[in-house]
Image (tube, grey):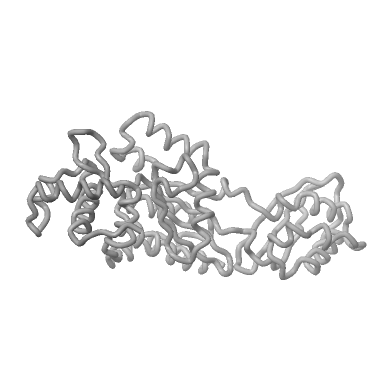
Amino acid sequence: MIQLTERESIILESLIYNFIKTATPIGSRFLSKKLSSKLSPATIRNVMLDLDEKGLISQPHTSAGRVPTDQGYRIFVNDLMRRISLSRPEKNAIEERLSCLSRDQDLILTKSAKVLSDISRQLGVVLAPRFEQGIFSRLELIHLAEKKILIVISIKSGLVRTITIELKSDISPSKLEETARVLNERLHGLTLAEIRDSIGKRLDDITEGDIGLIDLFIETVDTLFSLDDTDNVHLEGVHYVVGQPEFANLAKAQQILELIENKKNVIVHVLNDSGTLDSISIKIGGENQEKLMKEFSLVTSIYRVGNVTGVVGIMGPTRMQYAKMMALVDFVAGSLSKALGSIN
């Protein structure tokens, strides 16, 4: 662990605060004017040299001031940053935008991502509830047309998934009802992950219902009881991120666009990792294991719908207002839990 003197802490905090605000390297003369302790530029330069040697700040160019490193941001977030709360008008505005939107879960999630991006001026990201965490409640098989049925899977949190499948031959309504009854008896109370992993053993001795349809359930279990996470991540605010000074360089702007448009699986992987904790998670630059994410910071929190969880977060350059972002994702997570809970 890096130990800082009181003077080093003061200068590091001020340097990071002002760099976040200005997006330009911070010099000793600038800090001398900003600090209430009235330290001379020469004294500040010496302290900055010490912070540089400790790996907390760096000098992008010989004649430039200093900028924070990922490690500098980490010490700032953990030890120096003053926590804040959203103002009451900000909270009211978020609650108003998320409450009574509709009963459409996808619309609520998309709106939540937009709320995050509009307030943070970064990329707002929301990962849909992890469907496979849910406990199976019941399944319905509904005849739509010849050789086509609708499968409705409900879990105890209130979430519902519908899938249309085409059969090799038509099945009578009575056989559909009997098949649904047998499946409900065998699968009730299991998590969807348990069903996915053991459905073959649980259904291998069934003699009732339509055996062909039951075999189809076993063969397509990964499709029926799992979701492709890349289709369930909601991203809003790309224009805010590419408008940041860090991405004025065309190559860097293309990097973020490639990540968002073609490499969503990378973002989903990082979100899933960060969503395993009950507390707010912050990953700064190089702390991200994914190579494409090392230019970015991600601030996330989880939301809940019954026993199922999802992830909300803000993604942007490492130069971000971490205290505000933490307060924002925490409040939106709570508001989203309420909004989704009210429709289930």
Instruction: Quadrant for the C terminus, please.
Output: bottom right
Decide which of 213, 228 is in the foreground and name it: 228
Q: Is residue 248 above or below residue 235?
A: above
Residue at 73% x, 55% y: name it.
151
Residue at 20% x, 48% y: name it.
48
Residue farthest to the right, as pictured: 207
User: Can residue 324 be seen at all in this image of the molecule?
Assistant: no
User: Can residue 98 be seen at all in this image of the molecule?
Assistant: yes
Q: What x and y, as percent, mark residue 326?
A: 36, 60
Instruction: Quadrant for the N terminus, please.
Output: bottom left
Q: Is residue 37 above or below residue 284?
A: below
Residue at 48% x, 40% y: name it.
291
Decide which of 28, 340 is in the foreground and name it: 28
Decide which of 12, 187 is in the foreground and name it: 12
| Total marks placed | 0
Quadrant location of residue 88?
bottom left
Residue farthest to the top, as pictured: 250
Decide which of 24, 156 is in the foreground and name it: 24
Q: Is residue 43 above or below residue 61?
A: below
Q: What x and y, as percent, mark residue 299?
A: 40, 55
Q: Is residue 301 left or right of residue 202?
A: left
Q: Is residue 338 above or below residue 146?
A: below
Q: What x and y, as percent, mark residue 112?
A: 43, 56
Residue at 72% x, 70% y: name it.
189
Q: Is residue 344 left or right of residue 294?
A: right
